[in-house]
Image (cartoon, rainbow, N blue to C red):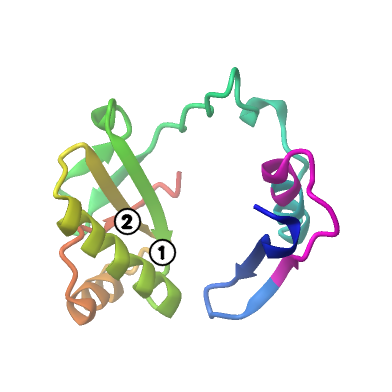
Amino acid sequence: MPPASSALLLVDAQGYAIGGVAGLAQQPKDQDAAFGFELRRLLHLEPKSSAATPLLGVRPEAPAFDVVKLDGTTHVTLEQQKGKVVVLVFFLPTCPHCHDALKFLDGLQKQLANPELVIVPVSVSDKKYVVEEMVGDLGISLVPYLDPSKS
């Protein structure tokens, strides 16, 4: 992508732009690394550790996770999803940008109808009733999950 048309915009849960990078003067040698560095700087995160560095072009394995349905009955773990494409998306039930993303992912899942694609929306809020209300208001069929252990 040409430097002048590359951009990174960081938006918080309330919809406010909190940072961004645009119009780089020259093409960085590694655009992913340049944007990753800038994103970490904007979020005040530690520099990238060697643990997350891809080996031989392969991304590192995702860490184990365990989330539950709103009714608390069904657990979903990464181990159960081995061999599938997993989209793990974290959302805030009151965030309009998250609503747009969830509606898009819901439509994508319906359009593709592929059992090898697993979309796991995880609420960053543990208020079950707020998530239930959001799902009803949006009319989506995606099954939202909670992360009671905050892992």
Whether residue 95 is visible here, answered yes or no, is: no
Q: Secondary structure at mark 1?
A: strand
Most extreme residue toward the right, as rendered?
25
The disc at residue 5 is: none
Q: Is residue 32 magenta?
A: yes
- The residue shown at (61%, 80%) is 16
Q: Which quadrant of the view contains residue 122?
A: bottom left
- The residue shown at (70%, 55%) is 2
Q: Which quadrant of the view contains residue 70?
A: bottom left
Query: N-terminal of the two: label 1 or label 2?
Result: 1
Of residues 71 and 29, the one nearer the viewer is 29
Q: Which residues are magenta?
A: 19-35
The residue tagged 2 is: 121
| 67 relative to 139, above or below | above
The residue tagged 1 is: 91
- The residue shown at (17%, 75%) is 139
